[in-house]
Amino acid sequence: MGILLFHAGLRRYLGSGRSLALTALFAFDYYGLMYNRIGLLENFSALCFLLCFYLFIRSEERRWPAFFLGLSAAVTALSKYLFVYFIISTLLAVAFRAWRRSDARSFIVFLAGGFTAWLPWFFGIYLPFRSTFRKIGLGWEMLAFPRSIHQAWSNLLHNPLPRYLQLMPVVGFLLVLFVAWTLLKLGRTRIRRPKDLTIFIFLWVVGGVCSLGVLNYQPQRYYLPIMPALYLAVSILIRDRDLIRSKRRLFWPLAILPAVLFFLFLRFVATGHWIFLGFPLVLRLLIFLSLTGVMMFIATANAAWKTAIEAAVFVVMLGSSLYLYDTHFYRKPTYNLEDASRFMETLPAGSVIMGQEAPRLALGTRFKTILAYDKWFNDKDPFKRFAPTHILFLDKFHNAERDWIRHRYPDVSASLRFIRRFRVWDTTVSLYRVQR
């Protein structure tokens, strides 16, 4: 459904051929393919993001879709409270459009839609359970909030988005170019002001990167709803290509910025690991040639040869995603969770397993699992309440889960006996037996 919304929105400002090609690239994006195999809340949130994108475009023509845009933006934030930045970004984009058009009514309609979703949540869910919200908020603050400006800045510099962009380098290159082009249009009065949709996508990307990037805890799945915006940024450069050609003396120097970033990546290759090297040499060379082809397509006059370049770049970008899917999943699938679950089945009958990863690793068993964590849930004396026989510790985040048990329940911690360690994604999970 998200892919259909993506394509429906693109067709309103791109030609049918280009909108279909860009939709195909988005649909076969490696991370999108892999994450959509999993039942994650972020997948539903990404659908809400795309619904807002479609409604924003529709609301440029008529006023009534602005109501459903506000409603959808509020639902997007409520689908996962971490994405509250998106309703702020959408609010700013709608306010910019209302200011530019002197159309305050459309902004009021948007606000009405937002409050239609927010008020029932506030009175029906938040107020009755505000003590629970407060407790979870304290736990989230302890887990994710930076302790200083320096730590927030360090988190932002080491956020996982650049790692993702290394596996889609053409889109990453154009994303940097899109941000620079949008800032140039905002800062130079001689250039036509950016259109409303440009501001919407710009705030979507910048808001997501800045709000998520400063967190101490930012798994890559949090960035999943930003992925559509990366491809939409490419669509804006394609849409604005006539304007770019007329201002190519200003546009060409902008290409220096993403080019320098790629140069720094190449310098880094000499001293450390770079996942871009996962592509074979021939494909890497084709990717760099594609970057040149993209710049020629955007910033030079129309010519017959540009159709061939456009098709070649599409093949390289699609081939990159399919290569990753083929080599990292189709040919070499792993069954770590299944193997862990089968081992868990060998535990004694009546076992009770506690830990953040317990529901996932013991999914195929008949054992009772307890999700417990400090300042989050079931943290009030879980050993008396549930009498767990085994504990699964996530060996990540400086062993915070294990440290909680060690400090809060030292006697239990001293009685733990190690059984086995399981490989799960990019970390491990350790199984311990609780001695009685």
Image (spheres, grey):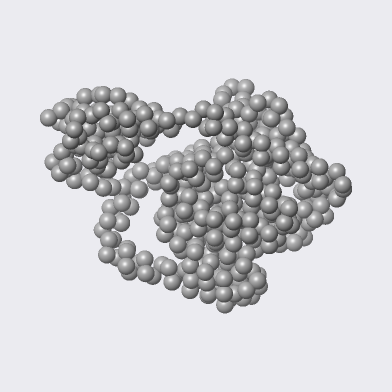
Residue at the outermost top position: 271
How many numbered marks, from 0 up? 0
Asked if residue 213 can be seen in this view, the reply is no
User: Residue visible at 30% across and 56% down?
Assistant: 133
Which quadrant does the N terminus fall into?
bottom right
Q: Position of residue 26 (x, y in %)?
A: 61, 47
Q: Position of residue 189 (x, y in %)?
A: 74, 61
User: Residue visible at 54% across and 60% down?
Assistant: 51
Asked if residue 385 can be seen in this view, the reply is yes
Q: Is residue 370 left or right of residue 272?
A: left
Q: Is residue 321 above or below residue 418?
A: below
Q: Position of residue 394 (x, y in %)?
A: 33, 33
Nearer to the camera, 136 or 357 = 357
Nearer to the camera, 419 or 217 = 419
Q: Is residue 133 left or right of residue 44?
A: left
Nearer to the camera, 121 or 338 = 338
Q: Is residue 421 left or right of residue 287?
A: left
The quarter of the picture where residue 4 lies is bottom right
The quarter of the picture where residue 29 lies is top right
Which quadrant does the C terminus fall into?
top left
Q: Is residue 38 above or below residue 10?
A: above
User: Residue visible at 57% across and 77% down?
Assistant: 105
User: Residue visible at 62% across and 74% down?
Assistant: 62
Q: Is residue 100 above or below residue 274?
A: below
Residue at the outermost bottom position: 105
Q: Position of residue 135 (x, y in %)?
A: 28, 53
